[in-house]
Image: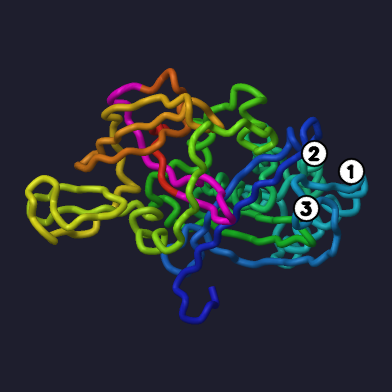
Amino acid sequence: MKAGSAKAVLVLVADTRLGAPAGQFEQALGDGAAALLVGNEDVVAEIRDSFHVSDEFSGVWRADGDEFVRSWEDRMVLDEGYSRVLPMAMSRLMSKCSLGPQDFARAVYDAPTDVRRHARVGAGLGFEPSQIQDAMFMTVGNTGAALSTMMLAAALEEAGPGDRILLASYGNGADAFSIEVTESIGRLAERRGIRRHLASKRMVNNYETYVRWRGLMTLEPARRPERPPMSISELWRERRQLLALYGKRCTSCGTPQYEVRPGRVCVVCQAKDQFEPYRFADKKGKIFTFTQDRLQSSNDPPNTAVVVDFDGGGRAMFDLCDRDPDAVEVMMPVEMAFRKLYFNRGVHNYYWKARPVRD
């Protein structure tokens, strides 16, 4: 990595593309995100070489202000775009490195919404079906800009030292990389990863819930006072509590405490100004009590509010997400999830919610 004084660079890729109701894209697209830490110390995979192709081909696009993805005629998009440009970058990378398909443990490359074309690209380059990384079409859908990075993360979960991976992404051209897995892959800490996220996902059980979450259905607002505007100054002042879910721990008695507006006195021993920062975001806990609110506006009614007792101490109230309302019970194990609460007066408001622990 050549980035001057930077020791490492965090690369985040995320995409949410919306297909119009009853269209092909509604069934084919998915939301996804992935993150990679790029550096030169203790790496689990090394980029050995790369090849890049630039091609101004607009096959699928969404202009600023468009709600739904647009696409040109399928045959034009696939024949003159994806199926021409992507294999060009992949084959030229292999020629540049003097490697063939047999030298790679995995071929990880972008997929269109037509999964047959994805398989055809790999076969045309000489890869066996067992070498081609699953594009997750049947489990997640096409996640756009995030897809190839998510596929790489999934491939690394099963890779061993010395494995070569051919990674390629497509869009206004193509980028291809030859990657070699190092011995450090065996020292990765336990993580949920792609495999366990897929295994623990919850299905949306009806189409009405889906269109509510997507904002495609206008709902009658709750008969309650209008939500006040978000205070930018308060968000800035309390950013550590609100965005990083930091509380405090009393250095006198050791009790963790979470308050959005922290006080100066310990709620247990009454020691004054004797605190150290304490992070709750990575702590799990159990539901102490809960209520199901059927009057508040919600995309997934009823709104479930819970009081969480954190492992190691501390108690606070949060909304509960990703849950079956009928399965919520006292002492249910929960973990924290950072979520967008609402969009109001041009401001996206984020905060933390609890959710049942995922396997």
Quick one: 157 or 7, which is closer to the camera? 7
Magenta stretch prevailing secondary structure = strand
Q: Earlier in the sequence, mark 1 or mark 2?
A: 1
Q: Secondary structure at mark 2?
A: loop
Question: What is the x, y in percent for residue 224?
Answer: 49, 35
Q: Earlier in the sequence, mark 3 or mark 2?
A: 3
Is 345 contained in the magenta span? yes
Position of 162 relative to 338 (above/below): below
**Distance of mark 1 from mark 2, alpha carbons?**
9 Å
Position of 35 relative to 224 (above/below): below
Q: Residues within 10 Å of mark 1 (few under 14, many from 20)?
A: few
* Res. 74 mark: 1
Question: What is the x, y in percent for residue 356?
Answer: 40, 31
Viewer-nearest of labels 3 and 2?
3
Read off the magenta span. Answer: 329-350
**Distance of mark 1 from mark 3, alpha carbons?**
16 Å
Q: Secondary structure at mark 3?
A: loop
Instruction: Identify the amino acid type marked 1.
Output: Asp
Q: Mark 2 — residue?
A: 114
Residue drawn 18% across the image and 53% down it: 249
Question: What is the x, y in percent for residue 165?
Answer: 61, 53
Position of 25 relative to 109 (above/below): above
* Res. 62 mark: 3
Q: Residues within 10 Å of mark 3 (few under 14, many from 20)?
A: few
